[in-house]
Amino acid sequence: MKLASIISNGKNEHFVSIQNTLWQKLDESVSELSLVELINNPNKIILDEKSQPISDSDFTNQLLNAKSIVPPTANIWGAGLNFNNHANDLSTEQPSSGPGSYLRPNSCLMDNQSDIILPKQSKRVTAEAELGLVIGKACKNVKRENWRDVVCAVTTVLDLTAEDIIRENPRYIPWAKGFDTFCSIGPQLITLDEFEPGVLEQLSVSTVRNGETIATAKVCQMLYDLPYLVEYFSAGRTLAPGTIICTGTPGAAVIKEGDHVEAIVEKVGRLSHRVTAAQSE
């Protein structure tokens, strides 16, 4: 199952993919539910019979709502340096005792197709494509062999970093990743039952700038695999439904005003954003 949400006249409109090429609007009665709640309650996926299906190309060009994926009670966790090439980006080594990790605020979320606003506090911002794991139910201390029991879907993530700030001091990572418009998640959720075991690991994750692929790698090239990441981030703490685990990037693209940047996860989704400079306040 594939679900997505758009903002229309200030309100959420949820959609479900039908026949893989069309999107059908859901009934307004479910518009206040998150997409994860709909996955957990498939009986509430009621089609709006009055609306016409929208083609996939027309639908993905609309402003897709990231906050319908990550509710206010959920967190956004990230695994740093999980691909060797990204460690090379930062002239460092991959951590051997567990992934680099960070927690970022929901306020940094932006909707797909919206503008990235470069903060005045940084002179070097990078954009990084990632596969996102979506937690479907509250969980804690999940064993690696049970990871698929708590992950309800996957999605695409575009992660941004004020790289000059973390080069100054790695302890500044949460601050360097918490600026407004520094995270995009979507444009859709795809439930795990759409992927046979082993398929996710063969998918490619790519960071693209101005049409050029800056970095790409398969999920199986991660140092810490998907089961490990679920076990690691749930250890000793409760993950709420809708929590996103960003699993790491194959490489970062330095961005500047006027650039167009994309995060592409094969068979999962494409996020697309224009880069703008901060305006005087």
Image (spheres, rainbow, N blue to C red):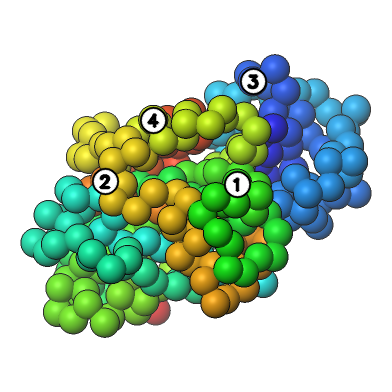
- The amino acid type, in three-letter code, at marker 4 is Gln
Secondary structure found at label 3? loop
- Which quarter shows the C terminus? bottom left
- In three-dimensional space, the C-alpha distance between marks 2 and 4, rounded to whole angstroms, equals 14 Å
- Which quarter shows the N terminus? top right
From the viewer's perspective, is 44 left or right of 186? right
- The amino acid type, in three-letter code, at marker 1 is Arg
Q: Looking at the image, is mark 4 or mark 3 earlier in the sequence? A: 3
Q: Is residue 74 above or below residue 64?
A: below
From the viewer's perspective, is 93 left or right of 266? left
In the image, what residue occupies the spot 64% across and 54% down? 150
Q: Nearer the viewer, residue 95 or 254?
A: 95
Q: Looking at the image, is mark 1 or mark 4 earlier in the sequence? A: 1
Dot 2: few (<14), some (14–19), or many (≥20) neighbours within 10 Å? many
Residue 220: quadrant of the picture: top left
Residue 160's x, y, as percent?
Answer: 33, 60
Is label 2 in contact with label 4 (beta carbons under 8 Å)? no
- In three-dimensional space, the C-alpha distance between marks 1 and 3, rounded to whole angstroms, equals 23 Å
Dot 4: few (<14), some (14–19), or many (≥20) neighbours within 10 Å? few
Q: Which residue is mark 4?
A: 202
- The amino acid type, in three-letter code, at marker 3 is Asn
Label of residue 20 in the image: 3
Q: Which residue is mark 2?
A: 250
Q: Looking at the image, is mark 1 or mark 2 earlier in the sequence? A: 1
- In three-dimensional space, the C-alpha distance between marks 2 and 3, rounded to whole angstroms, equals 28 Å
- In front: label 1 or label 3: 1
In the image, what residue occupies the spot 48% across and 51% down? 227
Is residue 98 in view? Answer: yes
Q: Nearer the viewer, residue 279 or 76?
A: 76
- The amino acid type, in three-letter code, at marker 2 is Pro
Dot 1: few (<14), some (14–19), or many (≥20) neighbours within 10 Å? some
Q: Looking at the image, is mark 2 or mark 4 earlier in the sequence? A: 4
